Image (cartoon, rainbow, N blue to C red):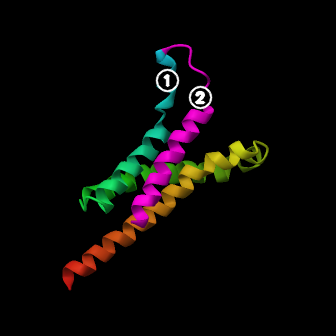
Amino acid sequence: MVEFIGGLMTGLLGLALSFYLMKPAESVLDYSDLFTIPTLAAVLVAVGAYVHAIRRKSWGAVLVWVGGMFLVMQLSFMLLGHHRVLMFLGWLGVFLFLPGIAAVFTTVASLLNRRKAEKSQNA
């Protein structure tokens, strides 16, 4: 259940970040900016967490790890390269970190959930 909640947080934060950064749309094509790679990675983590935690399918963990890996890499690049710039963005700077932090949480929960399932199968 922890994995599912973390995945849900990751997906919602990724979508919220896209809506927050998106300008008011003048045409339908303007909504294509909503589906950026970080947003899709956050949604991939959310779907994977649902499939792995609720549906108990092992391939859901792969979705969590692939999407989480991208968000964690993005988070580390922001921390290593642009940390001084992000301080001056205020809440937006904090908001940029949140999907990556939630992805770390979800990926660790996915790994622990997988190990717990393996222990119960061996017993």
Q: Amino acid at mark 1?
A: Tyr
Dot 2: element: loop
How crowded pointer 2 is (Cα within 10 Å; few <14, some 14-19, many 20+) is rated as: some
Q: Which of these two is toward me, 113 or 5?
A: 5
Residue 114: quadrant of the picture: bottom left
Is residue 118 positioned above or below 77 on the image?
below
Q: Residue furthest left?
A: 122
Alpha-carbon neighbours of circle 1 within 10 Å: few (<14), some, or many (≥20)? Answer: some
Magenta run includes residue 120: no
Q: Residue at x 50, y 30 (%)?
A: 34
Secondary structure of the residue carrying tag 1 is helix
User: What is the magenta range?
Assistant: 1-27
Q: Is residue 62 left or right of residue 98?
A: left
Residue at the image position 47 percent from the left and 17 percent from the top: 29
Residue 24 located within the stretch drawn in magenta: yes
Q: Given the image, on which type of amino acid does mark 2 rest?
A: Met
Provide the residue designation for mark 1: 31
**Residue at image point 52% right, 43% down:** 14
Instruction: Identify the residue shown where x is 55% and y is 40%.
Output: 16
The answer to whether 61 appears left or right of 67 in the picture is: left
- Looking at marks 2 and 1 on the same chain, the residue that comes earlier in the sequence is marked by 2
- Does residue 94 lie above or below 109 as drawn? above
Q: Are marks 2 and 1 in contact (CB under 8 Å)?
A: yes
Residue identifier under label 2: 22
Which of the 4 image quadrants contains residue 53?
A: bottom left
Q: Position of residue 19 (x, y in %)?
A: 56, 34
Quadrant of the snapshot with the C terminus: bottom left
Where in the figure is residue 70, as x and y percent of width and height?
Answer: 47, 48
